[in-house]
Amino acid sequence: MVETIKLFIAGEWTEGTGEEAYELRSPGSGDHIANVPIASQADVDRAVTAARQAHDEIRHWSAFERADLCHRIAAEVVPLVEEIARIQTLEQGKPYHAESLEDIQEANQYFLNAAEDVKRLSGEVIPTSDRNKRMFTFHRPVGVWAAITPWNFPVTIPLEYIGPGLATGNAIIAKPPLFTSWALLKLAEAFDAAGVPRGAISVIPGAGDIGEMLVTHNGVDAIGFTGSSETGRRIISKMGIKRSIMEMSGNGPTIVTADANVQAAAEAAVYGAYYNAGQVCCATERVIVLEEVHEEFVGHTLKAAQAVKLGDPFAADTNMGPLNNEPTAAKMDRHLNDARERGAEILVGGSRAGGFATDLYYDFTVIDRVPEDSAVAREETFGPVLPILTAPDDEEAAAIANRTHLGLQAAVFTSSLKKAFWYADRIRSGTVVVNDSTDFWETFQPFGGAAGTDTGWGRGALEEFTDLQTLVIDLDNV
């Protein structure tokens, strides 16, 4: 059965004013599963107008009133979890049992975290040189935000913007991709049921044209973007002086030192490379292994790779589903062909998997002796591949890790606390995880990048969604 989806604009469910609909197809089955209205400039204008009106209302609410609203949303999400997870698996392809359920089960946490954090988002009293003056600071909402989000986490990434944005008194217009928009629109039922003011949250799926309308719209004060560095640069070039949060690509290195628990490192690296079929900004994109433990690491990696079960994303034993789209699969093809031509050795996988309903299923792939100048080492592959590079010593391992413009999240495996801090001091990365996967994630974790990839998340996100206002009072004239 093909579902007909409606947009959520200005607190209403609507088919929009566009004349066409997008045929949403499942990457797992290839089936036509839904029709999504293609929005127009009029729909964007309506959402922005309603957002401005809603912001004028909720900006005056107390932090506790906004926290209460976030708690109500969180409660309304709970009964929708299984259905949203099912839809996410249909449209995105990630395994229902191994990933989608957990994804959506934590969705309400973004609202609960924001609700509790905003109550403690306080200003300060600043000393003045004049004894008759008092100086205070306040966090004020920025205004109307457009959140342009990717297809790899269709629900949780938009909520990284919607939760803290709403809690701090902003209005949010979320723009997911057309081909992974159904799950977020289903979750919008929770916004409706919780009594979110009309226009405070709208969900308008679209392609690049809708994103550009929002980025350049005079009624939009700020842009939140999660996606590729290439798209991020285009947004920055068009948005002018708007405020922004930009979370872009990663090329996460895992460094395995000579004193590491090599088996644990291999298991974590494999997990970081196959989780969500490698379609994660902090996936294990490169493993840099000290030469003296290289052979041991390869052995443990090949054993760990046997646990990767590619299959029907609704099957209970599947822990890796198909890639979401053909451009991502084609990039895997290109990177693996380039690695072969440069002399790398493919130990496991290396091609698309046959016997499935679509051509988007890709075998989990392990590549050894990867040249540093190969595409799979230099670029974000965003697929289920584990490239292994070697280094003669710690100095060179750190240098290899830093030879990238994508410094989002890194991992280091070592039994030495001193060495862990040594690497943390040297690696240009927003997060350095010691003795766990680069895919480590907590909903309240600061997630700021380095080397041009990202600006902060976690508890600090609330400050990102506010302007700092200073109030000075002259007591002599009061």
Image (tube, rainbow, N blue to C red):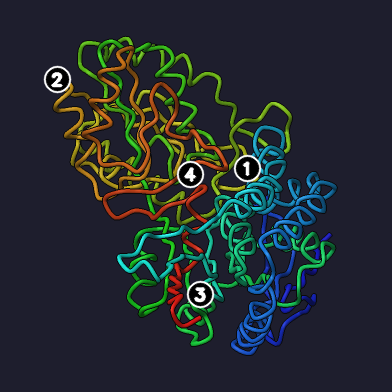
Mark pair 2, 1: CA separation: 37 Å
Residue 177 position (above or below residue 290): below
The residue wearing badge 4 is 280
Query: Image quadrant of residue 44?
Result: bottom right
The residue wearing badge 3 is 211
First in sequence: mark 2 vs mark 4: 4
The residue wearing badge 1 is 94
First in sequence: mark 2 vs mark 3: 3
Query: What is the x, y in percent for residue 246?
Result: 41, 61
125 left or right of 167 in image? left
Say which element carries label 4.
loop
The residue wearing badge 2 is 392
Q: Amino acid at mark 4?
A: Val
| Mark 4 nearby-residue class (10 Å; few <14, some 14–19, many ≥20) | many
First in sequence: mark 4 vs mark 1: 1
Q: Amino acid at mark 2?
A: Pro
- Mark toward the viewer: 3 or 1: 3
| Mark 2 nearby-residue class (10 Å; few <14, some 14–19, many ≥20) | few
First in sequence: mark 3 vs mark 1: 1
